[in-house]
Image: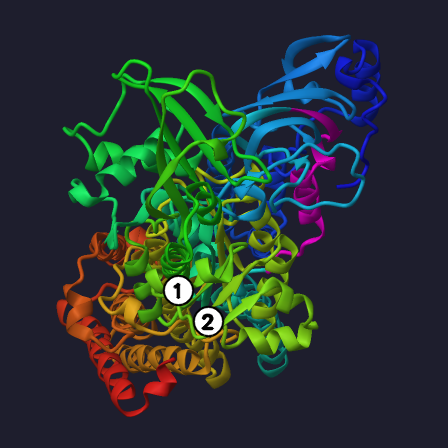
C-alpha cells in the first residue's frame, strides 16, 4: 500500500468537515469508475461500425443507385433490423448488469470534527478515521490504529476463503498487499468477520486495491473471438472476388458481343449473386438468438460473439473460491477419542462420540457469528445435534477471551443451569489448544498425526477443549483454566453441487480444466481431486515468478493446478495459455479475476457473488452463479459452431448454381437465364429464411463427445469449401440440363428459364436438407424436428406458385406457362440433385472423413 497518511495529523478526532470537503473536491468521490458501462449511443456506434454491417449497408446503397429499389430496400431493411437486434440485446444486457450493481459499502462511520457521524461511503477521503465493526464492509483502503480481535475476509481480492487476522500498526509505512496474517492493513471491499477497530483511510475510489485492478483493465487487450476474425476475412474476400468478377465480366461481354447494356446487366446480376450479404446477416441472427437462448439458461451474454467462441474453447481456467467451491466453510471431518468421522452437507445425525466435540465448538463460537468457520459449527449443530441436550440456546455468555497474537485460541465462559458454575469452551490452532491442555509428549504426537492427516486433505484444522470455572472473578488469561482436550475439527470450503460432473463433461468434450487459486497448494490439490481436475503437477506463484514468459509457456502445457497465485500472475497464465494456441475461457467472481477475465477469449463472471469489476470485464455472466450452467453454455456454443458451419456450407453451395447460371450463358452466347429479379427472389426470400432453419437446428446427440474445433482452424475449412462447391455444382448441372431440355421444347427460351428456375428453387430447398445432414447422419437429421424448415418450405411453395401461374408475374420473370409434365420434370430434377448430394456426403464421411472437417 502506498500513500500512507500520518496518523498524528488528526488523531482520533479525524478531519474537519471543511478539510474533508476540500480533499473530496481534489481527489474525487470514493467510488470506482463506472465508465465501462456501455450506453445506448456507444452500443449503436459499435454496431454500425462493424465492417460486416457496413458492407451490408454499402450493398444496399449500391443497389439503390443502380435502380434496384426492391433489392435495396430489402437489404437496407435487414441492415436496420440487424442494428436494432444488436442494440436491444446489448441494451437489455447492460440494464441487467446495472440491476446487479451493489455498493461495496453504502455508509461509513467516521470521525469528523471530533465526533462520530455516519456518512455516505462515497464521501470518504484519505485521512479520515473510520470505525470498523463485525459484519461491515471496509469502505476504503486503510491502516489500523486500534484493533480488537479483528479478522477480515479478503476473498474478493485474494481468493482465500478463510478470514485473516489483523493487528493495529499505523506506524508502518512499508508496501503491503492483501492477504496474510497479522497485517495492519484493511482493504476496500473486504468483510470484517469478527472484532472491531479504528482505521486511518489511506486510499479511496480508483486509488484503492480494487480500483487499481479495475484501472489496469484498460491496459489489458481483450482477445478477439476467432470467429469474428475469420468472418471479417471471409466477407472481404468474397466481396473483393465478387465485385472484381462482375467488373471483369462486364468488360469481357462488352468487348466480345458489343452489347454494353446487356454487359452491365450481366455484371450487376453476377455481383448480386456473389456479394456475401448473407454472411453478416446469418452471423448476427445466430449470435443474437444464441444470446437469447442462453439467457433462458441464466447465462447473460455481454458480448454476443463470445458465444460461438465458447463452443471452440479448448481450456477452461477456473478460480477456486466461489467458482468451484461455495465460498462457505463447512465442517468436513471430526476426530475425537481415537475415532474419526467424515461429515457432509447431508449429515443429519452424529454418533454419540462426537456430540461433545461439536457442542463445545459451538460454545466457543459467537451466538450469531459472521466468521464463516463459526457459522459452519452452528450449521453442523443444527443438523447433527437437534433433539439432544447438547444445544444450549438458553445459556448466557458471561466472559470471553479473544484471539491474541501470542495465543491463537479463544475461550468463552457460559453461565449454565448450575448456580456458580461456568462452562468454558475453547477453540483455536491445535498447538495453542495443546498448550492450554498441558499435553504430554504422547498426546502431542497423536495430535500432530491427526492434524497432518486432515491437513493432507486440504482441511483447515481447529482443536476444541472444555473446562469448568467455579471460583469468583475471572483469571487474567486462558492459561489459568483447567482444560480437557476434546478433539479436532477439519473445515473446508465445499465444492458446488454438480462440479465434478461438469468437469467430467468438459473432459469428455475435449476441454481441459485448470484451477488457478491463491490458496495453499495442499488445499488446491484437495479441491482439484474432488472436482476431478488433473493433479499430476502443481505450480505455485513463487515458482511462476522465477520463470520468464517462454519458460512459463512450457511449464503450463502439462500443469492444471496453480496455487498461491497473485492477480497479475493469473493474467500471465491466461496469456501463456493463449500463446500456446489454446482458446481460453476464464471463470471467476472476485476483483482479482478481472484482468484475466478480460484477457481471455471468453471471460465468464458470476452474477450473484461476482463483483462489478469482474462482471464488466467478462463476456458472459452466470446469473445463478451455477458452475454447471457453464456446461450448458458450452453445449450451446458448440451447437452454434456446428450450425454455422452448416449454414455457411449451404450459403456457399446455393451461390454456385446462381453464379453459374449468370455466367455460363454469357460465356457460351446463350440468352441470359437469370436477371436481378430472379436473384432477388432466390437470395432474399429463400436464403435468409433457410439460414434461420440452421439456427433452429437442434444439437447433435454426440456434440459434447467431439473434440473442439482445433485452435486457429478456420470455420470454413478446405473440406467444407470443397463440399459446398460440389453440392452447388450438382444443383447447377440439374438446372442447366432442365434449361436445355425446356429450351428445345415448344416454349423455347422462356419455358427453359421457367423450368430451370423451378429446379433452382427445389434444389435450394434440397441444399437446406443436405446440409442438415452434413454430419453424415441422414436419418437422424431428418428425424430432428425443425418448425422453421416446415415454414421455409411452405413459404417457398407459396411464393413460387403464383410466379408460375399469374400472367403478370410470369411476364416480370420472363417465363412461359408450364405444363404439368414440365413442372414435374423440373421438380424431379431438383429432388434428384438432393439425392445425389446426400449420397456424396455419405460417401465422403465414410471414405474421406478428414475432408469433412
Residue 815 rendering spot, x and y as whole percentages: 31, 64
In which quarter of the view is residue 533 placed?
bottom left
The image position of residue 679, as x and y in percent, is 42, 62
**Closer to us: 548 or 378:** 378
- Is residue 199 rendered magenta in the image? yes
Q: Tell me if I can see residue 249 in this picture.
A: no
At 82% across and 30% down in the image, what residue appears? 5
Question: Which residue lies under the disc numbered 1?
Answer: 641
Residue 579, image quadrant: bottom right
> What is the total number of numbered labels drawn onto the structure image?
2
Give the x, y percent position of residue 723. 37, 81
Residue occupying the point 22% across, 30% down: 390
Q: Is 12 displayed left or right of 827 in the figure?
A: right
Q: Which mark is residue 530?
A: none
Q: Is residue 158 among what the camera can see?
A: yes
Left or right of 6, for residue 666: left
- The residue range painted magenta reads 198-223
Say which label, 2 or 1, has the lower sequence index.
1
Give neighbour class at mark 2: few <14, some 14-19, many 20+ (Cα, 10 Å).
Answer: many
From the viewer's side, name the closer residue of 804 and 693. 693
Disc 1 element: helix
| In the depicted structure, whether residue 847 falls above or below residue 451 | below
Q: How did the renderer colour the structure? A: rainbow
Q: Name the residue under label 2.
A: 715
Q: Quadrant of the C terminus?
A: bottom left
> Does 664 sit above or below residue 513?
below
User: Could you tell me if the residues under marks 2 and 1 are in contact, i.e. CB atoms within 8 Å?
Assistant: yes
Q: Does the magenta stretch include residue 21?
A: no
> How would you rate the neighbour count of disc 1 (Cα within 10 Å): few for under 14, some for 14-19, many for 20 or more?
many
Pick whichever, 290 or 646, lies toward us.
Answer: 290
Q: Identify the secondary structure beneath mark 2.
A: loop
Residue 819, x across and y down, in percent:
16, 67
Amino acid at each position: 500500500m502506498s500513500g500512507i497518511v500520518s496518523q498524528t495529523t488528526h488523531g482520533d478526532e479525524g478531519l474537519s468537515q471543511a478539510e474533508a470537503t476540500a480533499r473530496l473536491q481534489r481527489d474525487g468521490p470514493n467510488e470506482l469508475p463506472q465508465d465501462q458501462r456501455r450506453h445506448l449511443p456507444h452500443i449503436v456506434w459499435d454496431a454500425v461500425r462493424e465492417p460486416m454491417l457496413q458492407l451490408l449497408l454499402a450493398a444496399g446503397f449500391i443497389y439503390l443507385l443502380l435502380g434496384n429499389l426492391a433489392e435495396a430496400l430489402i437489404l437496407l431493411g435487414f441492415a436496420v433490423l440487424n442494428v436494432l437486434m444488436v442494440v436491444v440485446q446489448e441494451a437489455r444486457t447492460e440494464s441487467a448488469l446495472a440491476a446487479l450493481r451493489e455498493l461495496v459499502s453504502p455508509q461509513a462511520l467516521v470521525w469528523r470534527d471530533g465526533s462520530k457521524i455516519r456518512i455516505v461511503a462515497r464521501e470518504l477521503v484519505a485521512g479520515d478515521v473510520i470505525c470498523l465493526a463485525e459484519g461491515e464492509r471496509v469502505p476504503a483502503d486503510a491502516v489500523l490504529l486500534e484493533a480488537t480481535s479483528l479478522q477480515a475476509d479478503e476473498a474478493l481480492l485474494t481468493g482465500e476463503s478463510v478470514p485473516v487476522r489483523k493487528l493495529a500498526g499505523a506506524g508502518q509505512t512499508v508496501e503491503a498487499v492483501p492477504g496474510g496474517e497479522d497485517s495492519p492493513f484493511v482493504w476496500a471491499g473486504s468483510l470484517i468477520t469478527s472484532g472491531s477497530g479504528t482505521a486511518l483511510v489511506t486510499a479511496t475510489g480508483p486509488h484503492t486495491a480494487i480500483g487499481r485492478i479495475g484501472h489496469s483493465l484498460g491496459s489489458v487487450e481483450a482477445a478477439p473471438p476467432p470467429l469474428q476474425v475469420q468472418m471479417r476475412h471471409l466477407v472481404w474476400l468474397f466481396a473483393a472476388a465478387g465485385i472484381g468478377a462482375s467488373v471483369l465480366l462486364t468488360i469481357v461481354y462488352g468487348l466480345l458481343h458489343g452489347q454494353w447494356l446487356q454487359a452491365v446487366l450481366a455484371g450487376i446480376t453476377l455481383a448480386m449473386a456473389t456479394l456475401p450479404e448473407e454472411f453478416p446477416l446469418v452471423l448476427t441472427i445466430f449470435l443474437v438468438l444464441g444470446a437469447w437462448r442462453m439467457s433462458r439458461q441464466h447465462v447473460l451474454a455481454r458480448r454476443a460473439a463470445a458465444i460461438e467462441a465458447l463452443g471452440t474453447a479448448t481450456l477452461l481456467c477456473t478460480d477456486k473460491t466461489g467458482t468451484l467451491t461455495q465460498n462457505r466453510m463447512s465442517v468436513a471431518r471430526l476426530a475425537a477419542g481415537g475415532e474419526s468421522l467424515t461429515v457432509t452437507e447431508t449429515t443429519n445425525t452424529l454418533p454419540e462420540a462426537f456430540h461433545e466435540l461439536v457442542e463445545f465448538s459451538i460454545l466457543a463460537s459467537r451466538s450469531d457469528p459472521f466468521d464463516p468457520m463459526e457459522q459452519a459449527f452452528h450449521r453442523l449443530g443444527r443438523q447433527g445435534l437437534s433433539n439432544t441436550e447438547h444445544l444450549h440456546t438458553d445459556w448466557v455468555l458471561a466472559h470471553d477471551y479473544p484471539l491474541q497474537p501470542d495465543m491463537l485460541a479463544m475461550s468463552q465462559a457460559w453461565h449454565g443451569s448450575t448456580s456458580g458454575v461456568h462452562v468454558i469452551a475453547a477453540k483455536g490452532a491445535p498447538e495453542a489448544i495443546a498448550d492450554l491442555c498441558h499435553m504430554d509428549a504422547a498426546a502431542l504426537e497423536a495430535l500432530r498425526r491427526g492434524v497432518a492427516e486432515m491437513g493432507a486433505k486440504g482441511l483447515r484444522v481447529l482443536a476444541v477443549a472444555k473446562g469448568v470455572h467455579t471460583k469468583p472473578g475471572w483469571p487474567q488469561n486462558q492459561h489459568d483454566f483447567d482444560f480437557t482436550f476434546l478433539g479436532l475439527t477439519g473445515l473446508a470450503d465445499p465444492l458446488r453441487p454438480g462440479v465434478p460432473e461438469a468437469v467430467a463433461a468438459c473432459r469428455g468434450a475435449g476441454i481441459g480444466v485448470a484451477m488457478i487459486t491463491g490458496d495453499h497448494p495442499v488445499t488446491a490439490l484437495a479441491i482439484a481431486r474432488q472436482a476431478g481436475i488433473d493433479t499430476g503437477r502443481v505450480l505455485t506463484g513463487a515458482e511462476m515468478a522465477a520463470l520468464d514468459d517462454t519458460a512459463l509457456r512450457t511449464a503450463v502445457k502439462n500443469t492444471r493446478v496453480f496455487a498461491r497465485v497473485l492477480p497479475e500472475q493469473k493474467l500471465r497464465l491466461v496469456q501463456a495459455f493463449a500463446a500456446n494456441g489454446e482458446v481460453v475461457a476464464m471463470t471467476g467472481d472476485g476483483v482479482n479475476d478481472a484482468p484475466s477475465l478480460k484477457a481471455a477469449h471468453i471471460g465468464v463472471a458470476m452474477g450473484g457473488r461476482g463483483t462489478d469489476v469482474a462482471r464488466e470485464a467478462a463476456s458472459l455472466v452466470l446469473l445463478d452463479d451455477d458452475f454447471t450452467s457453464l456446461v450448458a453454455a458450452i453445449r450451446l456454443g458448440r451447437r452454434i459452431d456446428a450450425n454455422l458451419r452448416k449454414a455457411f456450407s449451404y450459403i456457399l453451395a446455393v451461390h454456385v448454381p446462381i453464379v453459374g447460371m449468370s455466367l455460363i450463358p454469357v460465356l457460351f452466347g446463350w440468352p441470359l437465364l437469370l436477371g436481378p429479379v430472379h436473384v432477388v427472389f432466390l437470395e432474399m426470400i429463400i436464403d435468409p429464411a433457410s439460414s434461420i432453419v440452421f439456427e433452429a437446428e437442434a444439437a447433435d446427440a454426440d456434440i459434447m463427445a467431439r473434440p473442439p474445433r482445433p485452435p486457429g482452424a478456420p470455420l470454413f475449412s478446405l473440406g467444407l469449401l470443397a463440399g459446398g462447391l460440389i453440392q452447388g455444382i450438382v444443383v447447377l448441372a440439374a438446372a442447366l440440363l432442365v434449361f436445355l431440355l425446356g429450351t428445345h421444347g415448344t416454349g423455347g427460351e422462356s419455358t427453359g428459364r421457367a423450368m430451370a428456375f423451378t429446379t433452382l428453387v427445389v434444389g435450394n430447398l434440397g441444399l437446406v436438407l443436405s446440409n442438415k445432414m452434413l454430419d453424415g447422419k441422414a436419418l437422424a437429421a431428418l428425424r430432428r424436428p425443425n418448425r422453421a424448415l416446415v415454414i421455409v418450405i411452405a413459404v417457398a411453395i407459396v411464393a413460387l406458385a403464383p410466379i408460375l401461374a399469374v400472367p403478370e408475374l410470369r411476364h416480370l420473370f420472363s417465363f412461359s406457362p408450364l405444363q404439368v409434365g414440365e413442372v414435374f420434370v423440373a421438380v424431379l430434377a431438383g429432388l434428384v440433385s438432393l439425392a445425389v448430394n446426400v449420397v456424396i456426403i455419405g460417401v465422403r464421411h465414410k471414405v474421406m472423413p478428414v475432408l469433412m472437417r
